[in-house]
Every structure is written in structure tokens, then in C-alpha cells.
């Protein structure tokens, strides 16, 4: 865990949201609603669950984090900045020419980015290979991977679900962000995936379903995933709210790739400040 | 024949069958070696401790079963899931291993292309993709005929593409690609694989084309199975006093442009590119580009598969039909020389 004590997880989440909004402002639009919905999960991942060294992102003993949904890069950069892996000064370069922070996450561009996402449905297969590799090496490190509910439409995800259980990958913790929104509309209306917990249990996973914006519940789920004894992969289904923390964005329609007017970015930052934990 | 054609007429003559060459592409009586890739990988794995073997339910059909038996703790059966196979191979490579991942060429090139593109090539992972049934080496029809695999993998940045000719070269190339850092696509002949290049004092070098024989009338530039056929065609044409040089070009990418230009520049020879691949996007177009961009423009002909979904049937029949058998090659070269 990063050595920046005396901050609560809620405060970490606040800073992750704030960093994301500042990056969104650079572009004027983007995947800001997703960044806001997943900030609480990332706060727990980077400031409670994972072991890593901010000044040495390739440290062999680190837990790995695979961002399958590459368009969530804005959220991960926000977390990596808060974690001290990336400098705050790069916020203003987000998605600009020659930036290390491209709009879609890529392994070759960004310290702390372990895979190139963007083409959805890749992460869980890579995670299976990494978990097999870590076991081969006798490493105790875990692989954490985040993907989105829309990715459940990709057949490769189900190949990887079967494989992770088949190979008893107890060093794998996957999180699916169920915000029920993908490019063309609500995920459950695009290609139904419920009852998701039952499906994943039937696939051989240890499954927990939590309110992904309830930090204590998320923390408990990651602890349970870590402490679970059975030799099976762990899945956390995180139900989240798009735009969480900025009320006027939480209720905005068509929010997959959100356009935000210039004056609204300041309002968004003010809304975050208003909701900041004391 | 397709379903709207009349049923075949009984002739009383025995017909060749599709299954006849499943276990081997070798002609009757031809010298072969069994499973050269599998045995070479076992040997390479002794030198390179990071090598692991992976497959998607085609271990037995890509000769990887030899490795699985010799090194069971370094072998991953991933099930019939090619996207997972290559994604997981990338994951293992990202942890420092060198996966040799096998399947059929159609499944790697067509089904798992994006996975290979994004998780292996784009991230420059040390994964060796080794695929049986390249080009037209199956009589099952388009589902198993990877006529376009070279075009697809040539177009992928970072990817090295190798098309070995025979058992000797498969063994040598397996060691060479194991020693090479980075993604490689290698075509594979499996089972009892013909042994041809032992007669030519040949050694495979990654990225190098080598002249196997010289000749004054024709220069054949070829790779893979078609080098074997070109050598046979050259022997047939020799009886007609036609001298055929064969420049074997097993590394399709990066192409040995210097050797190709050097040989093609020698004046007066017909230049023929011969490949077990669709006429689109393979060795032929790569050679044409190499020559034209250097101002070299010999008379140029191309022996390749047509831009069509190919028939099902027995391989010898199909190779004759599509002009890639030794006899068909010799006949066409003679016609082109008139």
C-alpha cells in the first residue's frame, strides 16, 4: 500500500473523483460518469487491497492490476496520481498529443498500466495467463482485474471464466462494474446477463455482490476475497451509479460518453467538495 | 462439387479421399521425420527454462503432444477457446515466460486475430504462435484452409512470420524462434513431415533467404511447402534443359529484401514467386514491392492460390486443381517460357 497515511478511503475516493473531473475538463467530454462510479472501488483497490510500490511500478512482488475496460483509463490515472505512481502535473496532458495518459489505456504508455485495453473482453484472458505465470514462479502476488458489465457480452469473458475456475486460480480477484450502461444504452437491455451472481457461482467462482459505492461494503468484499480459503477465483460484482458524487451527472441521460459544458466542470468540482467527507 | 451440381458419375476408377493425407503431407515413399516441431520444442525447452507449451484442444494435431508428454508440468491445455489461449499466452509472457501456443492456422489468424493483435503484438510479448494446416494443407474446405494467414500476420506490426519447408527446417526454426525475443507466427507441417533440405547443405537463419539451387532460365522465389514443390518442379524441368534457380524465403517478415533483389537483378531470368497462400497479400506481393521499389522489373509470374473459397477434397487433387503441385508448376513455367 502507498505510504500516504492519515487519509480515509472516502477521502482517497474524493481525490480520485477530483483528479478524474480535472482530466475530463481537459477534453471537455469523456468517460467521466464511469470514473465517478468506480472511484470508491479503486480507492479500496489502491489504498487497502493491493501491495505495490508507487516509485517502482514494475516491482516484481507487486499485485497486478489489469484494466480490461480501457476507456476507464481516466479513472485509473486518477487513482495512480492519488497513489503517487503518476505525478499530478500530468493531469493537464490527459488525452493530448504526446501524453503518457492516452484516452484509452495502453501498457506501453503509462507507468502502472499493465495491459492495453480498448478492445473489450481481453482482460480476463490475460489475467488467467498472469495468474498461471505467478503460480509457476511461486509468487504470492495476486492479479486484480476490472471489467465492465458490457464486456459480459464478449464470449471470450466466458472462456476465461471457465478457465480461471478450471485452473483453480485463487490468486485472481475480478471486479465487474455493473453500472448498467454501455455505448448503445442500458447493458441489461443490450444483452441480458442476469442473474449474474448465480451464473458466476455456477461457473465455479467465489462471488460477492456489493453496492460498489459503499466503501465499507467494498472493503469487506475485498477482505473476504483475500481471506477466502477455497481454491477458486474470486469475483466481486459491484453495482455502481454512473456519475456518483456529482448529483447533476448522476441523473443525466446518455451518459456513456458524456459531454459536459464548460461551466459545468466547476460545478462538478463544487459538488464533489460539497459531498467530501469531513 | 457444390450442391447445385449434379451428383458425380460413377467411373469405376477409385477416387482419392479427403482423409488420405491428414497424418502427413508426404508423398508415398518420401523420407520423413515424425513430429519435428514437438521434438525440437522439447530440446529447446531444455535450453530455455522459460518455455511453456499451450494449446486449444489441438495438442495432438500440432505435434505439441510430444512436448506435453516430455514436460507435463510446462504444458497448458486451455480447452477449445482460442481467444483465451492467446490472451493467456500474453499473460504468461508478461510474467516472463515464453509460451509456444498452438492451434490451426485458421483459428489463430481468423478467430483470435484481435487477441493476438492487442495482447501479443501491440504489447510486444514473447509468444510463439505455431499453427498447423497453413495455406492449402487440409481437404476439409475453407473452415480448415488458412489461405490468407500470411497476409493477416504480415499486416500485424511487431510480428515475425516464418513459413518453413520441411522437417529439418521446422526443427531449426523452432530453436531460432525460441532464441528470438518477441512475437512470432510460424506455419507448421505436422505428423510425418517430409525431409528435403538435408540434401542442400541448408541451415535456417531467421530473416535470411537462401538459394538452394541455381539455374539460368528461371528464378523461383518460394517459401514453405511450395519450396518443396519448386525443387521437385525444377528437377522435372531439368530434363527439358530448363535451368531453375530456387531462392527459399522462409522468413516472410522481415523479408530478406537484399537477397531477393540480388537474385532477381541477374538479367534474363523469368521470376516466379510460388507460395502456398492466396494470391493476395502474401510472399508474391511482398517480393513485387521489394523489386519495383528498387527499380527491378523482370518478367514476373505468381504461383499462388486463387482469391476464392477453395474446394473440399483430397489434397493431391486440390494441389493439381489450383496449380501448386510440382507437375502443375513445371507445366506453367514451361508455358511462360514459350
Image: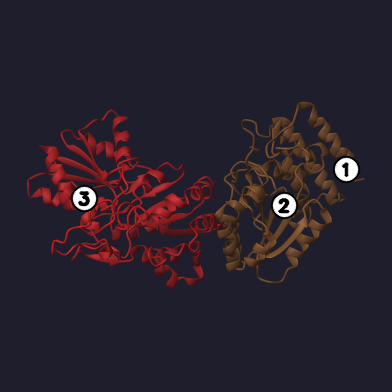
Chain colours: A brown, B red
Residue located 58% across and 58% down the image: A158
Chain where mark 2 sits: A
Up-down relation of residue B338 to residue A39 (above or below): above
Q: Is residue A26 left or right of residue B8?
A: right
Mark 2 residue crowding within 10 angstroms, few (<14) / some (14–19) / many (20+): many
Provide the secondary structure element on which disc 1 rests: loop
Chain where mark 3 sits: B
Up-down relation of residue B274 to residue B77 (above or below): above
User: Badge 1 is on which residue?
Assistant: A276
Residue located 38% across and 58% down the image: B174
Q: In this rendered view, identify the residue nearer to me: A48 or A220.
A: A220
Furthest residue in direction left, as rendered: B240
Mark 3 residue crowding within 10 angstroms, few (<14) / some (14–19) / many (20+): some
User: Badge 3 is on which residue?
Assistant: B321
Q: How many marks?
A: 3
- Image quarter for residue A159? bottom right
Measured in 3D between alpha carbons, the distance from the residue under mark 1 to the one under mark 3, in whole angstroms, is 75 Å
- Image quarter for residue B10? bottom left
Question: Which quarter shows the N terminus of chain A?
Answer: bottom right
On residue A53, the disc is 2
Mark 1 residue crowding within 10 angstroms, few (<14) / some (14–19) / many (20+): some
Q: Nearer the viewer, mark 2 or mark 1?
A: 1
Q: Position of residue B4 (x, y in %)?
A: 28, 51
Q: Is residue B221 left or right of residue A50?
A: left
Residue located 68% across and 40% down the image: A256
- Image quarter for residue B61? bottom left
Q: Position of residue A183 (x, y in %)?
A: 64, 41
Q: Position of residue B294 (x, y in %)?
A: 30, 30
Q: Is residue B205 left or right of residue B234?
A: right
Q: In this rendered view, identify the residue nearer to me: B173 or A247.
A: A247
Q: Position of residue A47 (x, y in %)?
A: 78, 52
Tags 2 and 3 on a common chain: no
Amino acid at each position: 500500500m502507498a505510504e500516504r497515511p492519515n487519509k480515509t478511503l472516502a477521502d482517497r475516493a474524493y481525490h480520485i473523483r477530483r483528479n478524474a473531473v480535472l482530466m475530463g475538463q481537459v477534453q471537455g467530454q469523456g468517460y467521466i460518469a464511469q470514473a465517478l462510479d468506480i472511484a470508491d472501488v479503486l480507492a479500496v483497490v489502491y489504498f487497502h487491497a493491493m501491495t505495490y510500490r508507487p516509485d517502482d511500478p514494475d516491482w516484481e512482488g507487486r499485485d497486478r492490476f489489469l484494466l480490461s475496460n480501457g476507456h476507464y483509463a481516466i479513472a485509473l490515472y486518477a487513482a495512480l496520481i492519488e497513489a503517487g505512481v503518476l505525478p499530478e502535473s500530468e493531469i493537464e496532458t490527459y488525452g493530448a498529443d504526446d501524453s503518457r495518459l492516452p484516452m484509452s489505456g495502453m501498457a506501453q504508455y503509462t507507468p502502472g498500466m499493465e495491459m492495453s485495453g480498448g478492445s473489450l473482453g481481453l482482460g480476463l484472458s490475460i489475467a488467467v495467463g498472469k495468474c498461471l505465470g505467478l503460480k509457476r514462479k511461486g509468487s504470492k502476488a495476486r492479479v486484480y482485474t476490472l471489467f465492465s458489465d458490457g464486456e459480459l457480452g464478449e464470449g471470450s469473458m466466458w472462456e476465461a471464466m471457465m478457465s480461471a475456475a478450471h485452473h483453480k486460480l485463487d490468486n485472481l480477484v475480478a471486479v465487474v462494474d455493473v453500472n448498467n450502461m454501455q455505448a448503445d444504452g442500458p447493458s441489461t437491455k443490450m444483452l441480458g446477463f442476469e442473474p449474474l451472481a448465480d451464473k458466476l457461482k455456477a461457473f465455479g467462482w467465489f462471488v460477492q455482490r456489493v453496492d460498489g459505492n459503499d466503501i465499507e461494503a467494498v472493503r469487506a468484499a475485498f477482505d473476504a476475497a483475500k481471506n477466502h480459503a477455497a481454491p477458486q477465483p474470486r469475483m466481486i460484482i459491484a453495482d455502481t451509479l454512473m456519475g456518483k458524487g456529482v448529483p447533476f451527472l448522476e441523473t443525466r441521460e446518455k451518459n456513456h460518453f458524456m459531454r459536459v459544458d464548460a461551466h459545468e466542470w466547476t460545478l462538478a468540482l463544487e459538488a464533489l467538495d460539497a459531498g467530501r467527507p469531513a | 462439387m457444390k450442391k447445385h451440381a449434379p451428383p458425380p458419375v460413377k467411373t469405376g476408377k477409385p477416387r482419392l479421399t479427403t482423409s488420405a493425407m491428414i497424418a502427413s503431407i508426404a508423398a508415398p515413399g518420401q523420407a520423413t521425420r515424425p513430429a519435428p516441431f514437438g521434438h525440437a520444442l522439447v530440446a529447446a525447452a531444455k535450453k530455455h527454462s522459460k518455455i511453456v507449451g499451450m494449446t486449444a484442444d489441438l495438442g495432438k494435431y500440432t505435434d505439441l503432444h510430444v512436448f506435453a508428454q516430455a514436460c507435463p508440468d510446462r504444458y497448458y491445455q486451455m480447452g477449445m477457446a482460442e481467444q483465451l489461449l492467446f490472451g493467456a499466452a500474453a499473460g504468461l509472457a508478461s510474467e516472463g515466460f515464453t509460451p509456444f501456443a498452438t492451434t490451426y492456422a485458421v483459428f489463430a489468424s481468423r478467430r483470435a486475430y484481435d487477441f493476438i493483435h492487442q495482447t501479443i503484438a501491440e504489447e510486444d510479448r514473447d509468444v510463439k504462435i505455431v499453427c498447423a494446416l497453413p495455406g492449402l494443407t487440409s481437404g476439409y474446405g475453407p473452415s480448415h484452409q488458412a489461405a490468407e494467414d500470411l497476409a493477416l500476420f504480415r499486416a500485424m506490426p511487431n510480428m515475425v512470420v516464418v513459413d518453413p519447408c520441411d522437417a529439418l527446417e521446422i526443427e531449426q526454426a523452432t530453436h531460432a524462434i525460441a532464441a528470438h525475443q518477441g512475437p512470432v507466427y510460424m506455419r507448421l507441417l505436422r505428423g510425418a513431415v517430409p525431409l528435403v533440405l538435408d540434401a542442400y547443405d541448408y541451415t535456417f537463419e531467421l530473416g535470411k533467404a537462401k538459394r538452394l539451387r541455381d539455374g539460368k532460365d528461371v528464378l523461383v522465389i518460394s517459401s514453405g511447402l511450395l519450396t518443396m514443390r519448386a525443387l521437385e518442379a525444377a528437377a522435372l524441368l531439368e530434363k527439358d534443359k530448363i535451368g531453375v534457380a530456387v531462392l527459399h524465403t522462409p522468413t516472410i517478415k522481415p523479408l530478406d529484401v537484399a537477397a531477393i533483389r540480388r537474385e532477381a537483378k541477374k538479367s534474363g531470368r523469368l521470376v516466379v514467386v510460388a507460395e502456398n497462400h492466396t494470391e493476395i497479400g502474401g510472399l508474391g506481393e511482398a517480393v513485387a514491392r521489394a523489386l519495383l521499389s528498387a527499380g527491378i522489373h523482370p518478367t514476373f509470374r505468381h504461383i499462388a492460390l486463387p482469391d476464392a473459397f477453395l474446394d473440399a477434397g483430397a489434397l493431391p487433387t486440390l494441389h493439381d486443381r489450383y496449380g501448386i503441385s510440382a507437375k502443375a508448376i513445371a507445366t506453367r513455367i514451361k508455358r511462360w517460357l514459350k
